[in-house]
């Protein structure tokens, strides 16, 4: 039996979780929940906080590079900000 | 070189993180931040949410048993509720 590659699984799972947040926000926008709405900000903050905790945990136990974590989070923030701009400029 | 035991590290890290939340709440109480304060509730909710995300992540990639995760979270909730009661009954 191959040993489980926890590192690879950690990277895959974090990428998936980041993608899920992006999808969630897209769905919110498609349903015309305005980005000015405080609830939108709160949902987003909570989701980003949760992903940050996962990244921190994975980095602490040595499954991922801290650099990957930073890049994942800042990349997601950029995507979300692009979405936000696209939505508010319609 | 011994292979890194990611499972053991995951268990240790989660236990540490749960302990940290307990300590944080104790410090808040020692400093007389009232448990009735909405900020207290918010800090606690945020911390529990973060730990829940770590647990979920570790379980998804197969590092920990789901049962351990549930026991950790419910055990912490019980400890916190005991602290809360002790504080409000002074």
Image (tube, coloured by chain):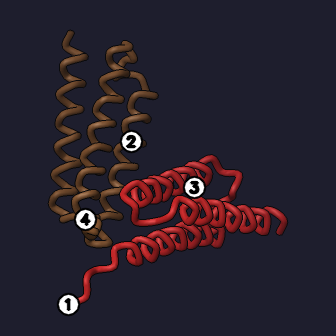
Chain colours: A brown, B red
Tags 3 and 4 on a common chain: no
- Using the rendered view, name the quadrant where residue A33 is placed: top left
**Residue mark closest to the camera, 3 vs 1:** 1
Outermost residue toward the front? A1
Instruction: Classify mark 4: helix, strand or loop.
Output: loop
Q: Earlier in the sequence, mark 3 or mark 1?
A: 1
Instruction: Classify mark 2: helix, strand or loop.
Output: helix
Instruction: Classify mark 1: helix, strand or loop.
Output: loop
From the viewer's perspective, is residue B55 above or below residue A41?
Answer: below
**Residue mark closest to the camera, 3 vs 4:** 4
Tags 4 and 2 on a common chain: yes
Q: Residue at position x 41%, y 77% from top? A: B8
Q: Nearer the viewer, residue B76 or B25?
A: B76
- Determine whether label 4 and label 2 are within 8 Å by CB: no
Residue A49, image x and y in percent? 38, 49
**Chain holding disc 2:** A
Q: Which residue is mark 1?
A: B1
**How would you rate the neighbour count of disc 4 (Cα within 10 Å): few for under 14, some for 14-19, many for 20 or more?**
few
Give the Cα separation between the discs numbered 1 and 2. Answer: 38 Å
- Determine whether label 3 and label 4 are within 8 Å by CB: no
Q: Residue at position x 46%, y 28% from top? A: A39
Q: Nearer the viewer, residue B37 or A42?
A: A42
Give the Cα separation between the discs numbered 4 and 2. Answer: 26 Å
Q: Which residue is mark 2?
A: A47
**Chain holding disc 4:** A
């Amino acid at each position: 039996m191959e040993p489980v590659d926890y590192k690879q699984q950690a990277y895959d799972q974090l990428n998936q979780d980041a993608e899920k947040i992006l999808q969630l926000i897209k769905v919110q926008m498609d349903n015309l929940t305005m980005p000015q709405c405080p609830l939108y900000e709160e949902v987003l903050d909570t989701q980003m906080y949760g992903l940050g905790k996962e990244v921190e945990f994975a980095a602490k136990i040595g499954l991922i590079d801290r650099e990957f974590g930073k890049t994942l989070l800042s990349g997601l923030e950029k995507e979300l900000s692009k979405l936000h701009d696209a939505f508010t400029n319609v």
